[in-house]
Amino acid sequence: MDHENNISNEILPPILEEFLNYFSTIKARSPNTIKAYTYDLTLFLKFMKVRKNLAKDANFDNIDISDVDTNFIESICLNDLYAYLSFVANERSNTPPARARKVASLRSFYNYLYTKSKVISKNPAQELESPKLGIRQPVYLTLDESKKLLDSIEGPFKERDYAIITLFLNCGLRLSELANININDIKDDKLTVIGKGNKQRTVYLNDACINAINEYLKVRPHDSVKDKKALFLSKRLQRISIKTIQYLVKKYLRDANLDGKKYSTHKLRHTAATLMYRYGKVDIRTLQRLLGHSNVSTTQIYTHVDDAQLRDAVYKNPLSEINHDKKN
């Protein structure tokens, strides 16, 4: 298991800090991506110091990488990169998606050093292959389970919480997108959100969303509010946090007798996408725009069909009623 919180007090080498600054400002990657890449590359450099017998301590938490320089990076070859991936697979039990992220971080780091800052003479990560990822079926609530979840919402913040879960289930918003909604982001039936990569998109609100938001606005506090722009407020009158949203979703899932471990806020996004595709007959390109996916291949996981649909398709074959007995 990766312990990403252990990197918060690390002294990073200048060569890595420069890359992360570039990645954050010029490439405009999200704080979560920066945190993930920082962890991946810090672990990589520690592993390389051990591999090259330059670490005084075998405990990874104690390995100092602040002295890593261009010469050290230049000494690393493609075989070293594969050794690192083997290490995280075998010693750290990284899944294929986790290893794929590490490949992406290495490629970005080396591409920056080779093509942007031009401090290394070769780029071994150029030939680095990413692990094959199996097609993962999305986990989602059925239509009846979604209604059951909405019916479970009670308590002192029921209008706020009902609006939050309604937006998740109808619009397929990401957790960070929902937490960051400002009141002035909503104009009639249009909601403007800032998604991954700082990309702005328009999400259209149906009647259920508009009604839920209006009911919440009737009871939303006005006095002593610390973030007056924020749509959703915590009990402390601040913008609601991501952790609070995660907590309340888990709570209502349990209240609805749904598996709180199996489902999450992101699974509600999966639910919205699946329901739109299945019942709304939304085509894949439209769904891609709705969800803010940069690549349609990401959206294609929602084109899955269940056994009932497969059975129905076979029974609707026009040849299904022709049999040998009738022929004779």
Image (tube, rainbow, N blue to C red):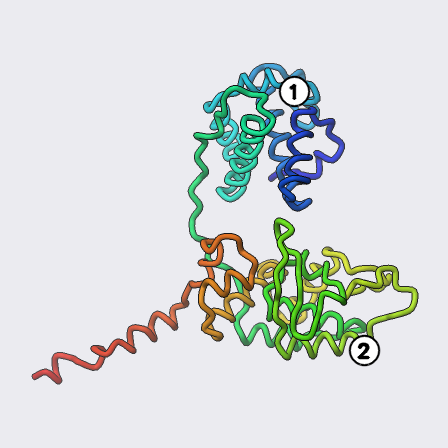
- Which labelled disc corresponds to residue 68? 1
The residues bearing labels 1 and 2 have C-alpha atoms spaced at a distance of 57 Å
Question: Seen in the image, is 125 located left or right of residue 14?
Answer: left
Residue 12 placement (x, y as % from top left): 70, 27
- Residue at 72% across, 64% down: 248
Residue sticking out furthest to the right: 224
Mark 2 neighbour density, 10 Å: few (under 14) some (14–19) many (20 or more):
few
The residue under label 2 is 218
Q: Which residue is drawn at 51% across and 42% down?
A: 95
> Residue lying farthest left?
328
Give the answer, above or below, for where 247 lies relative to 166.
above
In percent of the image, x 64 and y 35: which residue is there?
39
Answer with left or right where residue 67 lies relative to residue 74: right
| Amino acid type of the residue tagged 2 in the rendering | Lys
Residue 29 picture quarter = top right
Mark 2 residue element = helix
Q: Nearer the viewer, residue 56 or 183?
A: 183
Q: Which residue is drawn at 53% across and 38% down?
A: 104
Tell me the quarter of the image containing the C terminus. bottom left
Which mark is first along the chain, 2 or 1? 1
Q: Quadrant of the N terminus?
A: top right
Q: What residue type is labelled 1?
A: Val
> Regarding mark 1 in the picture, which secondary structure is present there?
loop
